[in-house]
Image (cartoon, grey):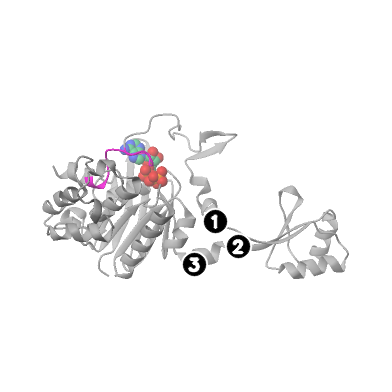
Amino acid sequence: MPYMIELEGLTKHYGDKVAVDHLTFTVRPGMVTGFLGPNGAGKSTTMRMMLDLDNPTSGTVRIDGKHYRQLKDPLTYIGALLEAKAVHGGRSAANHLLCLAQSNGIPRGRVGEVLDTVGLSTVAKKRSKGFSLGMSQRLGIAAALLGDPQVLLFDEPVNGLDPEGIHWIRNLMKNLAAQGRTVFVSSHLMSEMALTAEHLIVIGQGRLMADTSMKDFIHQNSRSYVRMRSPQREKLLDLLHDEGIDAVAVGNGSLEIDGVPADRLGELAARHQLVLHELSPQQASLEDAFMQLTAESVEYHAHDGEPVPAQAGARPPGEPQPAGARPGEPQPTGWGADWQKKRS
Ligand SMILES: Nc1ncnc2c1ncn2[C@@H]1O[C@H](COP(=O)(O)OP(=O)(O)OP(=O)(O)O)[C@@H](O)[C@H]1O
């Protein structure tokens, strides 16, 4: 199959820190693949290695069967949005794209086309320094689309966007996939992935936790159950036991029952004249399932209001983070900037 991204044993160490740990998976064309993991799981590091912006400690990434360095005019194979504020702020939007086009053998006519696609035509001559986060995000996407690549990477593209911007990016990614392209998008929000991705790769502390279709993930993880609460809890437990119904006692005196409809449980209690204070069908959220899957691998856990490292050797949150390590802070790095640095 063409235009796959194939990772084999991909590993990255930063000193003692294992950021990416023997990742092996394949990203396929024609669908949006979500790359999900809690903060610090190694998503950005993995994407940077896909783009040859960071060298793996071991393992390989292949794009369309080749190493990134073997791709002729790489921007025509793979486009990426890594960090929205990565643009040289003094240049106009059009100029920024023109520079990228010229150094990559891309016809200059593409600049107008992609500005149009992302809705920035009217501000093409404006300096990107004054751009809002949403506009910068759109400009970053224009750069990613410039070479009309078959493979697209988006690192947390909805971060900080308003609902209209989020809606726009979701649709764009789905449309790109519907055109047969390979679309790989990272997020730390399961709810976001559930709306966009058809396939899911989940990582925690650099390790692969799940490689599954979204449909299967939802099927396996959206547990529905009934919560019951009664002042006659012991009698209720005995009754359920006699009926062969398993109940799990949880905090605040509630019982959780899987696989039995709420109306049957209500009728049963009524027949035995048991008072119920609660009888409510529940649906475990996908976010809960994701948190459970990665719970052991979260780098920092909240603890009595104080974040503490979950892992020996993890960097305490108060300490300065290395460049490129923390998301959410605009850094003078990213796809455009790094790419230019690397090639210059
Ligand atoms: N240049 C670096 N030097 C040292 N450690 C780094 C560096 N870059 C990343 N790390 C560490 O590697 C781990 C993975 O970081 P990475 O940014 O890839 O995670 P992420 O999944 O993208 O997180 P987020 O969702 O917070 O963006 C983190 O513990 C991070 O602190």
Secondary element type, mark 2? loop
Left or right of 163: which side holds 87?
left
Q: Which mark is residue 289?
A: 1
Q: Which secondary structure class fits the magenta region best?
A: loop
Label whose residue precedes the other's in the sequence (2 or 3): 3
Q: What percent of the width, then of the height, locates residue 301? A: 53, 39
Residue 147 visible to an observer of this rendering: no
Label whose residue precedes the other's in the sequence (1 or 2): 2
Decide which of 5, 311 is in the foreground and name it.
5
Decide which of 105, 211 is in the foreground and name it.
105
For mark 2, what is the residue? 223
Residue at the right extreme of this rendering: 273
Q: How many marks?
A: 3
Q: Which residues are magenta?
A: 324-336
Residue 262 visible to an observer of this rendering: yes
- Three-letter amino acid code at the position of disc 2: Arg
- Three-letter amino acid code at the position of disc 1: Ala
Residue 7 counted in the magenta span: no
Residue at the front extreme of this rendering: 122
Q: What percent of the width, then of the height, locates residue 267? A: 81, 69
Decide which of 207, 270 is in the foreground and name it.
270
Which image quarter: residue 147?
bottom left
Q: What percent of the width, then of the height, locates residue 172? A: 34, 62
Q: Indicate if the residue with disc 1 has its beta carbon within 8 Å of ligand 1.
A: no
Residue 331 counted in the magenta span: yes
Q: CB atoms at circles 1 and 2 under 8 Å apart?
A: yes
For mark 3, what is the residue? 216
